[in-house]
Image: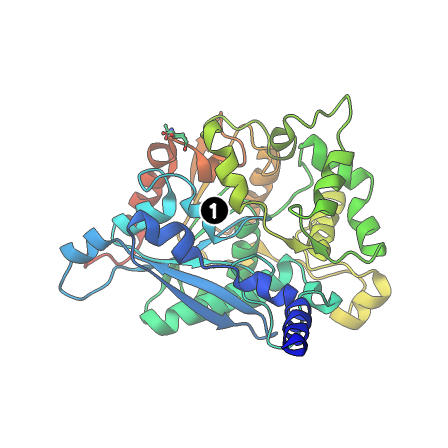
Amino acid sequence: MMMMMMIAITVSILLGNVQSFDGGSLCEELIIPSGYPCSEYTIQTKDGFLLGLQRVSSSSSLRLRNHGDGGPPVLLLHGLFMAGDAWFLNTPEQSLGFILADHGFDVWVGNVRGTRWSHGHISLLEKKKQFWDWSWQELALYDVAEMINYINSVTNSKIFVVGHSQGTIISLAAFTQPEIVEKVEAAALLSPISYLDHVSAPLVLRMVKMHIDEMILTMGIHQLNFKSEWGASLLVSLCDTRLSCNDMLSSITGKNCCFNESRVEFYLEQEPHPSSSKNLNHLFQMIRKGTYSKYDYGKLKNLIEYGKFNPPKFDLSRIPKSLPLWMAYGGNDALADITDFQHTLKELPSPPEVVYLENYGHVDFILSLQGKQDLYDPMIFFFKSSGKFSSM
Ligand SMILES: *[C@@H]1O[C@H](CO)[C@@H](O)[C@H](O)[C@H]1NC(C)=O
């Protein structure tokens, strides 16, 4: 008996890291309780990561359209340190995930590797260094590619894509790949980012200047988790008299106008999700060098990885002219800066439809209480006018 218990405890300690991936389900925690049918899928990327994907519909829209034909699929791609829950954090009348389902869309919720709704790796344990050996480059070329392939094979339909923040970095990179973009119907990007060299967020600039990204990699820290004691104390250590900790969110994202202050505690039950130190390092490389390129290993290793001294760029001009794009950006967004956004526009082969919201910060694009009027209604109008909507 004692022996069995010892073994059970040992096994649970050994598996501790794995189990944290199976701590619950997004469907059960956040979506089904609001009365929406939701099912969980697990897909496997080419490099062996197991990603959670949720499929959400509206019970009322299903009842209305009982001729069997489902609405068009839309894939939601969350931002850095967030996951699929980001689209369901407010009430059903306020949150994009629910609103799209109510409009008859077949909503697919993406969760990139490393987040709490992804399910680990076929052979690597979460505590291994190699488990965290990736940046947004792999999220674009493996995670987004697999999500789009999978949804396309299940629905036999082209896919609408919605991204926020890092979700737009990886969408734009994925759209430069012909075999991915051919399965995309149209895309809507919130806080669109490709170039990052005009980031104005004081706390981020301080971390860049201190080379925090390189420091933590040198220290052998490969998982970046601000919910851990270590991660939280790192953030606190960055504040001082000039950079107050009280308004940490503003010093990272810019001043947000419109989210519900009384829900912050609830938001923090979900956020932030983990990411990799290498990913932060890749993002900081972009801020330092003004590039939208693959990860920079340094000249020698670049030569081995890419066959040249400098990492290859993601060339925005390779995105097909025929892909309908809609983009919304904000005047107070300290991460998706207006100058950088204009740089993105200049390199796109055809101009997207653009919405500008002067008082929006980075987080307002998913949490704003007026998001429906300001963003989601115009986005759905754009989708309906650009796609095949015979059945809607
Ligand atoms: C803001 O959040 C609180 C707490 O969840 C809720 O009671 C209130 O109705 C919300 N306000 C709006 C305008 O949605």
Asked if one can make out residue 269 in the rendered structure from this viewpoint, the answer is yes
Residue at (71, 24) in percent of width and height: 244
Residue at (37, 30) in percent of width and height: 370
Q: Horizontal and vertical percent for residue 209?
A: 81, 38
Q: Is mark 1 within 8 Å of ligand 1?
A: no
- Residue type at mark 1 is Ala
Image position of 245 (left or right of 93) = right
Residue with the mark numbered 1? 86
Q: Horizontal and vertical percent for residue 174?
A: 53, 61
Coloration mode? rainbow
- Numbered-mark total: 1
Q: With respect to residue 250, does 346 lie above or below?
A: below
Residue at (48, 39) in percent of width and height: 266
Q: Quadrant of the N terminus?
A: bottom right
| Residue nearest the observer in this picture, 340 or 131 | 131
| Residue nearest the observer in this picture, 196 or 361 | 361
Q: Horizontal and vertical percent for residue 144?
A: 51, 63
Q: Element at badge 1?
A: helix
Which residue, as the protein is rendered here, is positioned at the far top?
Answer: 241
Asked if one can make out residue 180 in the rendered structure from this viewpoint, the answer is no
Q: Quadrant of the C terminus?
A: bottom left
Q: Horizontal and vertical percent for residue 169?
A: 57, 51
| Residue nearest the observer in this picture, 241 or 73 | 241
Categorize mark 1 by other alpha carbons within 10 Å: few (<14), some (14-19), many (20+).
many
| Residue nearest the observer in this picture, 296 or 182 | 296
Q: Assign ligand 1 to one image quadrant.
A: top left
Residue at (82, 67) in percent of width and height: 301
Image position of 158 (left or right of 175) = left
